[in-house]
Image (spheres, grey):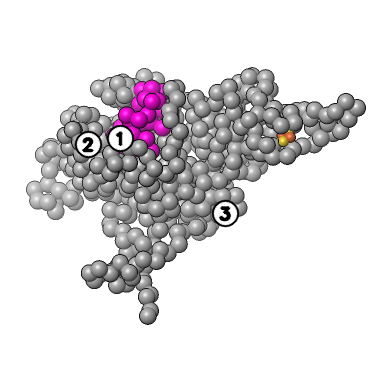
C-alpha cells in the first residue's frame, strides 16, 4: 500500500503521469519555512527585519491610531499632533490594552486604559498615579519603554525599520526610483494580498504570465485585452523572450523581456528585484510606436509580509509627462491609492465597482477575509488577474509541488538568492553587506530598470531572431552596468549613446 510520491522542482511527480491518478498526489507536502515564515526569530524574519519596509500609507494615519500587522507583529502607527510618526507595539506595556484605542497627544500617544503616555520612540512620558503615589509613577515612567520602531515618511508612504537599532541601514533612497524626474511624481498605493509575501514577490519575476493571464481575461461586455488595449500596449500581447541576470553581487536580479514590435523595432524591457522584497518595473503602457532609449521606472513596490498568510503590495506609481507623455497614468490617478491601482483589474481583493474608495482618501469597505468570500468572486472567476492567480496558489505556495519551466527561471533565481542571503552562503548579500553598500553609495544605489524601443531589424530566420533578441538584451544589461557608475544627465547621455551603438551593431 505504498503511496510514495516523488516531488520537487523539475521532477515529474511519482505516478501523476497516468489517468485519474489524483489519489497519488492528494497529500500536500509542507511549504518552505526558510523562505516564507517571517515572524520574530525565524531566519527569513530576522533577515527582513534588517531592511526598511513601507508599512502603510500616510493617509492611513488619521486622528485615530492605525492598527497594523507587519512581519506577524501587532503594531499601531500614528502621527502625533506635533507631526511625528510613531510605530509602536500594539499592546501597552502596562497591562496589554491595544494602543489602537489610545488617544493621540501633542507629543506621542496615551493608552486608553490607565493613561500611560508614550513618545514615538517608545519612551514613557507619563504614568498617572494615585495622589500620594506620584513618586512610583515617575519611577515607572523613567525606566519603562514601549516597544517601538524607527519610522519615517516618504511621498505618502510610512516606512519602519524593525531590526536591532545598532544594525540600522541608511534609508536606501534609490537614485532614480525615489527621486524621479521633476515633471513626474510618486503616487503611493497599498493593496492587501491574502497569501504569503513570497508569492507576491515571485509574481514580479514571473513575466511570462503577462500574456496568458492579462490578455485572455475577458470581462463580459468588454473586448479581449480591453484593459491593456486602452493603454495601447500592443507589445505586451507578444510572448516575451526572458533572460535573468544576478546583479549587485547577488543582492538583486535584473531581467529582460524582449519582444519584437515590428520588422524594424524591438522592445527590451528591463525590470529588477532587490532582496528581500523590493522590485522596480519600467513603463507599463508602452505602444512601441516610437524609438525610446532608457525610459525609467514606472512602479516601485515592496511585497511586505503582514503575517505568514497575508501580505501587502505597497509602493509608488510614477505619474507625469516625462515618463508617460500620453497622460494615461494622470487620467487614472484617482485609481491609485488604498486598495486600488490604476492598471488592470484583478490586482486587489475588491473589484472596482464595489470599491467606494475609487478616489483617494475616500473610505473603502473593509478588506474581505479571504479571496473566496468576496462579493466579486464570480466576476473574478470570469476575469482573473494577478491577485487571483497569486492568492490561489494556496495561503503559502508549496514549492515542492511545482514543475518549473525555463520561463520560471527568474522566480527560482530570486528564491536561490534569498536562500543564500539568509543562510549566509552569499556573504555579499548579508544585511551587513547591504548596509555597507548603501553607506558607500550614500544611500543611493542604482536600478537597472528601463524601457527601450530599439531600431533593430528582425532576424532572417526564427533562430536568428531569437538569437538577436538575446544578444541585444545582454548588451543592454552590460551597458546599464557601466552606466550605473555615472550620475544624472551624464548617465542618461551615456545610456543613449550606448543604446545607439547597440542598434548599429545589430543591423
Ligand atoms: S494597559 Fe495601558 S495604561 Fe494600563
Ligand atoms: Fe501580472
| Residue occupying image coordinates x 18% and y 50% | 466
Measured Cα–Cα span from mark 3 to mark 1: 35 Å
Measured Cα–Cα span from mark 2 to mark 1: 10 Å
| Residue occupying image coordinates x 9% and y 51% | 461
Q: Which residue is mark 2?
A: 219
Q: Residue furthest right?
A: 132
Write the start and end of the magenta stretch as one range. 334-360
Q: Residues within 10 Å of mark 2 (few under 14, many from 20)?
A: some
Callout 1 secondary element = loop
**Residue 372: x percent and y percent?**
37, 45
Q: Is residue 198 above or below residue 81?
A: below
Q: Which residue is mark 3?
A: 42
Location of residue 231 (image quadrant): top left
Side of 302 where 17 appears, left or right: left
Q: Which residue is mark 1?
A: 345
Please say whether residue 346 is one of the residues in the magenta stretch.
yes
Would residue 481 be seen by someone viewing this image from the given angle? no
Q: Residues within 10 Å of mark 1 (few under 14, many from 20)?
A: many
**Residue 235: x percent and y percent?**
19, 37
| Residue occupying image coordinates x 36% and y 19% | 183
Amino acid at each position: 500500500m505504498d503511496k510514495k510520491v516523488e516531488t520537487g522542482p523539475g521532477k515529474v511527480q511519482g505516478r501523476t503521469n497516468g489517468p485519474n491518478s489524483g489519489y497519488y498526489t492528494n497529500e500536500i507536502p509542507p511549504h518552505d519555512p526558510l523562505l516564507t515564515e517571517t515572524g520574530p526569530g525565524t531566519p527569513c524574519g530576522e533577515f527582513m527585519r534588517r531592511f526598511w519596509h513601507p508599512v502603510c500609507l500616510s493617509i492611513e494615519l488619521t486622528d485615530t491610531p492605525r492598527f497594523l500587522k507587519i512581519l506577524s507583529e501587532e503594531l499601531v502607527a500614528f502621527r502625533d499632533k506635533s507631526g511625528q510618526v510613531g510605530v509602536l507595539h500594539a499592546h501597552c506595556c502596562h497591562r496589554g490594552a491595544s494602543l489602537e484605542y489610545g488617544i493621540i497627544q501633542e507629543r506621542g500617544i496615551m493608552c486608553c486604559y490607565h493613561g500611560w503616555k508614550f513618545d514615538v520612540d517608545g519612551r514613557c512620558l507619563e504614568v498617572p498615579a494615585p495622589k500620594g503615589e506620584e513618586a512610583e509613577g515617575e519611577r515607572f515612567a523613567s525606566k519603562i519603554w514601549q516597544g517601538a520602531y524607527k519610522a519615517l515618511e516618504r511621498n505618502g508612504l510610512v516606512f519602519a525599520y524593525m531590526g536591532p537599532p545598532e544594525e540600522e541601514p541608511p534609508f536606501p533612497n534609490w537614485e532614480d526610483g525615489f527621486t524621479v524626474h521633476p515633471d513626474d511624481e510618486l503616487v503611493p498605493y497599498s493593496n492587501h494580498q491574502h497569501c504569503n509575501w513570497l508569492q507576491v514577490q515571485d509574481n514580479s519575476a514571473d513575466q511570462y504570465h503577462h500574456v496568458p493571464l492579462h490578455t485572455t481575461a475577458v470581462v463580459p461586455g468588454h473586448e479581449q485585452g480591453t484593459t491593456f488595449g486602452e493603454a495601447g500596449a500592443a507589445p505586451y500581447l507578444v510572448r516575451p523572450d526572458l533572460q535573468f541576470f544576478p546583479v549587485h553581487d547577488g543582492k538583486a536580479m535584473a531581467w529582460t523581456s524582449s519582444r519584437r514590435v515590428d520588422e524594424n523595432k524591438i522592445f527590451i524591457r528591463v525590470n529588477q528585484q532587490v532582496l528581500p522584497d523590493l522590485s522596480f518595473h519600467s513603463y507599463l503602457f508602452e505602444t512601441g510606436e516610437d524609438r525610446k532609449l532608457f525610459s525609467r521606472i514606472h512602479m516601485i513596490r515592496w511585497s511586505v509580509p503582514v503575517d505568514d498568510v497575508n501580505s501587502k503590495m505597497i509602493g509608488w506609481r510614477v505619474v507625469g509627462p516625462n515618463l508617460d507623455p500620453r497622460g494615461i497614468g494622470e487620467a487614472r490617478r484617482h485609481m491609485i491609492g488604498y486598495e486600488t491601482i490604476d492598471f488592470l483589474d484583478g490586482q486587489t481583493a475588491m473589484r472596482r465597482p464595489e470599491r467606494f474608495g475609487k478616489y483617494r482618501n475616500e473610505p473603502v469597505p473593509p478588506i474581505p477575509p479571504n479571496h473566496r468570500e468576496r462579493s466579486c468572486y464570480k466576476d473574478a472567476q470570469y476575469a482573473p488577474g494577478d491577485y487571483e492567480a497569486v492568492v490561489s496558489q494556496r495561503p503559502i505556495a508549496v514549492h515542492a509541488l511545482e514543475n518549473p519551466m525555463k520561463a520560471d527561471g527568474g522566480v527560482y533565481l530570486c528564491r536561490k538568492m534569498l536562500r543564500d542571503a539568509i543562510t549566509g552562503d552569499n556573504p555579499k548579500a548579508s544585511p551587513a553587506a547591504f548596509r555597507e553598500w548603501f553607506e558607500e553609495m550614500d544611500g543611493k544605489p542604482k536600478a537597472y530598470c528601463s524601457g527601450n524601443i530599439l531600431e533593430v531589424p528582425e532576424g532572417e530566420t526564427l533562430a536568428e531572431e531569437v538569437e538577436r533578441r538575446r544578444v541585444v538584451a545582454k548588451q543592454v544589461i552590460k551597458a546599464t552596468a557601466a552606466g550605473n557608475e555615472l550620475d544624472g544627465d551624464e548617465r542618461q547621455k551615456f545610456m543613449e549613446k550606448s543604446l545607439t551603438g547597440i542598434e548599429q551593431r545589430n543591423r
